[in-house]
Amino acid sequence: MASPLAFLRSLTPSRLALGAVAGAAALGLTVVASASAFSAPSSPLTVAPSPSSSAAATTLPAAGTTTPAVAKKPKPASRTKKAKNVPERPRDSFHGKRLVYDKALMTVWMMNAQDEVVGRYPVVGRWDRPAKGTYHIYSKSKLAINPNSKVTFHNMMRFTYGPDTKSPIGFHSIPRYYDGTPMHSTRQLGLAIARGGCVRLSEEASKELYKFMKVGDLVVVLPSP
């Protein structure tokens, strides 16, 4: 029987490496070693981690980013329904100070010289007049009278004429009969119920337009639906 000293001398590097592999396998570890590990004592043994311990790569959205909302398509007004999805800005291609009247949406926008919206108001008008195109304010009156309809109205801003009667067409407040009764309520603003060609606004909105628009200023009329 070999002595203990002789046994220790018989343990070559390759035998030590094999013993390490066997021990690691008994503990359930995966052992990866190069071929030279069994002949050179300087070659290290590498214990590979279990696949379950690897973290999966996850891509996260950048902080503070949001998905932009898709603007809904505007729906035109009618005699019984108001327009839906009216945009914040008018749908014209002009720039600078102007008043934009969208007959399809029964809405007017006041645009300043910097092309900023300074006012947006629902109106009562009609689809077939005035014709789409560009006009200019040619006269203004704080108080106007229509003897044919027996009504008065405030803040009249004329910019064209009717196709048949050649009567002035402009922006003004809701007309009132001689007894003071309004022709229609402010709740009906936004409907295409006008019989004449003028564009009616609330008393407050007509005051804002009257202060903003000067004689000679541009008026843009957008087409009917």
Image: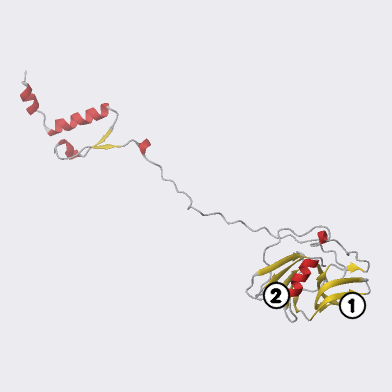
Q: Position of residue 29 (x, y in %)?
A: 28, 31
Q: Position of residue 27 (x, y in %)?
A: 27, 27
Viewer-proximal residue among 65 and 171: 171
Give the mark toward the camera: 2 or 1.
Answer: 2
The crowding category of the residue bearing disc 1, from other C-alpha atoms within 10 Å (few below 14, some 14 to 19, many at least 20), is few
Q: Quadrant of residue 221?
A: bottom right
Is 119 displayed left or right of 179 in the figure? left
Q: Position of residue 199 (x, y in %)?
A: 81, 70
Identify the residue under disc 1.
165
Identify the residue under disc 2.
98
Q: Position of residue 79 (x, y in %)?
A: 83, 61
* Residue for point 73% across, 58% down: 84
Tell me which colouring the rendered structure shows: secondary structure
In terms of sequence position, does the residue under pointer 2 or pointer 1 come before the other? 2
The crowding category of the residue bearing disc 2, from other C-alpha atoms within 10 Å (few below 14, some 14 to 19, many at least 20), is many
Is 165 displayed left or right of 5 in the figure? right
Please state, as top left, top right, bottom left or bottom right, where the C terminus lies in the image: bottom right
64 above or below 197?
Answer: above
Is 91 displayed left or right of 190 in the figure? left
Label 2, label 1: how far apart the Cα atoms are: 27 Å
What kind of residue is marked 1?
A: Thr
Do the CB atoms of the residues marked 2 and 1 lie less than 8 Å apart? no
126 above or below 136?
Answer: above
For numbered disc 1, what is the local secondary structure?
A: loop
Q: Quadrant of residue 163?
A: bottom right
* Residue for point 90% across, 74% down: 146
What kind of residue is marked 2?
A: Arg
Q: How many marks?
A: 2
User: Can the viewer see residue 222 in this picture?
Assistant: no
